Image (spheres, rainbow, N blue to C red):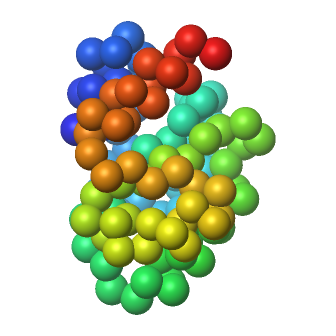
Amino acid sequence: MCAVVAVLEGWRAHYFGLELPVADIAVAASHVRAELVALGLSTIGDGQELLEQLAELRDALPVGTRLVVGGPAAMNVNEDVERLGIQCLERIDQFQELLREYGTK
């Protein structure tokens, strides 16, 4: 859904698929020179493991690439995610607004 919204907002979007390992996301983001990586987190198992993977991804992304998460699982760990410097969005319209703001900077 985020990829569709991004395209509608004039962004070039790449969908990397489901359950892509952290290292592969970072490589793909680097390859396409992503300014922003958005993840939809639909299920939560071990919240601590999720946070560790998100921190690992944040650290592996190219400098300046912003990481944003949303979805049901993100809502369960949103305060912890935001402490990691990762933005957590509750609704798709918030993502749309973020793209608009980001595009004007």
Relative image position of residue 105 (x, y in whole percent): 64, 15
Task: Quarter of the image for the N terminus: give it.
Answer: top left
Task: Using the rendered image of the protein, determine whether residue 39 is visible from the camera's viewpoint.
Answer: no
- At x 45% / y 54%, what residue is drawn? 88
Relative image position of residue 39 (x, y in whole percent): 40, 51
Q: In this view, does 50 lie above or below 30?
A: below
Query: Number of marks in the image?
Result: 0
Closer-to-camera residue (76/69): 76
Relative image position of residue 90 (x, y in whole percent): 31, 52
- At x 50% / y 42%, what residue is drawn? 37
Q: Is residue 18 above or below residue 11?
A: below
Relative image position of residue 57 (x, y in whole percent): 61, 60
Q: Is residue 45 above or below residue 62?
A: below
Task: Using the rendered image of the protein, determine whether residue 22 is visible from the camera's viewpoint.
Answer: yes
Q: In this view, does 46 lie above or below 22?
A: below
Closer-to-camera residue (11/76): 76
- At x 27% / y 45%, what residue is drawn? 91
Closer-to-camera residue (74/94): 94
Closer-to-camera residue (79/74): 79
**Farthest residue in the right direction?**
63
80 with respect to 19 (left or right): right
95 with respect to 68 (left or right): left
